[in-house]
């Protein structure tokens, strides 16, 4: 059917792929945005994402309900976030080093406990067909949108408004910009950071549930492809703005969908190079933000990368 619309199938496939691929990027980046807004970095979200995917898939398979799997993925994220936040509250603990350790721990535990779930099939999360108005099967497939993407849009708007206008958002930003000022106002800095880290990890666990229960919709040891780490670069690219995180996630998702889109129209030589587009984009972002001629505009003052 791709020959019927010619090269138009490429942008349509990229559109659909951007929506599908961007969803885990969106949840992980929103979670890390909240965590970093409180003045802490969590590089362990890659491990949280993978473990959340395993926990969600296994729970959905054993219970027969994808929603129980989704809750399990989020709960696994909360546990990882609480552990990261509590340990980072101890004196002389480096949040970056601990995050790397948790990344390795999370992926290792996921591989160990997830071996029995590689072959079984778990029930998937539902999707809504927004393309029924069209007769093109390519467009219908592109507009078959999972409910988590819609939830992600709502979470994006809520966090964008909350961090700017609510009292809770003001407290989180104050803790992230100046811990001394927050303490002077009577706030418990460590407790706020622990809660923000737990919330951020919960969103990463939900992103993992999307990976295993919808797209690609299975459990295997290479399911994340480094999306948790790339999401940290995405937050820097988005300048710690949840609304910009949404559009950046779509950009990353579109880059990840470019290779399969070219393959779908018969490009058989060199298309695999486009599979590296998300990693090239991540590298370019890291180089740009590390340049001495550019400042980390918008970065919370208490982040270790700003000191």
Image (cartoon, rainbow, N blue to C red):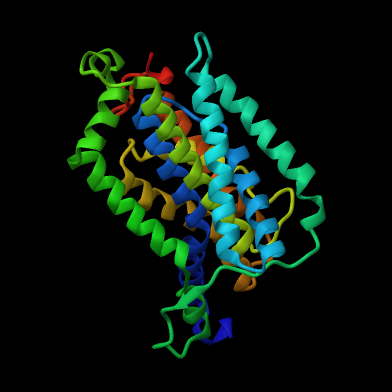
88 or 101: which is nearer to us? Answer: 88
Q: Quadrant of residue 35?
A: top left
In this view, the residue farthest toward the top is: 92
Left/right of residue 236 with respect to residue 181 in the rendered view:
right
- Residue 277 position within the rendered picture, expressed as x and y whole percent measured from the top left: 55, 49
- Residue 9 position within the rendered picture, expressed as x and y whole percent measured from the top left: 51, 75
How many numbered discs? Answer: 0
Left/right of residue 112 with respect to residue 90 in the rendered view:
right
Q: Does the image show residue 114?
A: yes
In this view, the residue farthest toward the left is: 165
Residue at image x 47%, y 18%?
Answer: 89
Image quadrant holding the C terminus, namely top left
Q: Does the image show residue 270?
A: no
Left/right of residue 163 with respect to residue 274 in the rendered view:
left
26 or 95: which is nearer to us? Answer: 95
296 or 149: which is nearer to us? Answer: 149
Image quadrant holding the N terminus, namely bottom right
- Residue 16 position within the rendered picture, expressed as x and y whole percent measured from the top left: 48, 68
Q: Quadrant of residue 103?
A: top right
Residue at image x 53%, y 49%?
Answer: 74
Residue at image x 79%, y 42%?
Answer: 112
- Residue 161 position within the rendered picture, expressed as x and y whole percent measured from the top left: 23, 47
Q: Is residue 141 above or below residue 186?
A: below
């Amino acid at each position: 059917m791709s020959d019927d619309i010619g090269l138009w199938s490429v942008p349509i496939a990229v559109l659909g792929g951007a929506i599908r691929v961007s969803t885990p990027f969106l949840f992980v980046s929103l979670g890390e945005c909240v965590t970093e807004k409180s003045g802490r970095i969590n590089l362990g979200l890659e491990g949280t994402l993978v473990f959340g995917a395993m926990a969600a898939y296994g729970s959905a398979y054993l219970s027969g309900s994808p929603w129980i799997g989704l809750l399990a993925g989020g709960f696994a994220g909360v546990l990882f976030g609480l552990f990261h936040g509590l340990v980072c509250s101890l004196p002389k603990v480096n949040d970056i080093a601990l995050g790397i350790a948790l990344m390795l721990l999370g992926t290792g535990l996921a591989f160990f406990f997830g071996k029995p779930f590689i072959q079984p099939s778990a029930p998937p999360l539902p999707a809504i067909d927004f393309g029924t108005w069209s007769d093109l099967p390519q467009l219908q497939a592109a507009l078959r949108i999972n409910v988590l993407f819609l939830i992600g849009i709502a979470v994006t708007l809520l966090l964008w408004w909350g961090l700017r206008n609510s009292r809770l958002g003001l407290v989180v930003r104050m803790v992230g910009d100046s811990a001394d000022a927050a303490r002077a106002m009577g706030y418990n800095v460590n407790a706020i950071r622990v809660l923000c880290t737990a919330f951020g990890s919960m969103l990463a666990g939900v992103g993992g549930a999307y990976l295993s229960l919808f797209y690609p919709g299975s459990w295997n040891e290479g399911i994340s492809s480094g999306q948790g780490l790339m999401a940290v670069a995405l937050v820097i690219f988005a300048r710690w703005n949840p609304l910009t995180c949404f559009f950046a996630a779509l950009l990353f998702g579109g880059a990840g969908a470019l290779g399969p889109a070219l393959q779908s129209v018969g490009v058989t030589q060199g298309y695999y190079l486009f599979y590296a587009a998300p990693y090239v984009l991540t590298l370019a972002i890291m180089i740009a933000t590390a340049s001495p001629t550019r400042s980390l505009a918008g970065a919370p003052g208490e982040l270790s990368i700003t000191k």
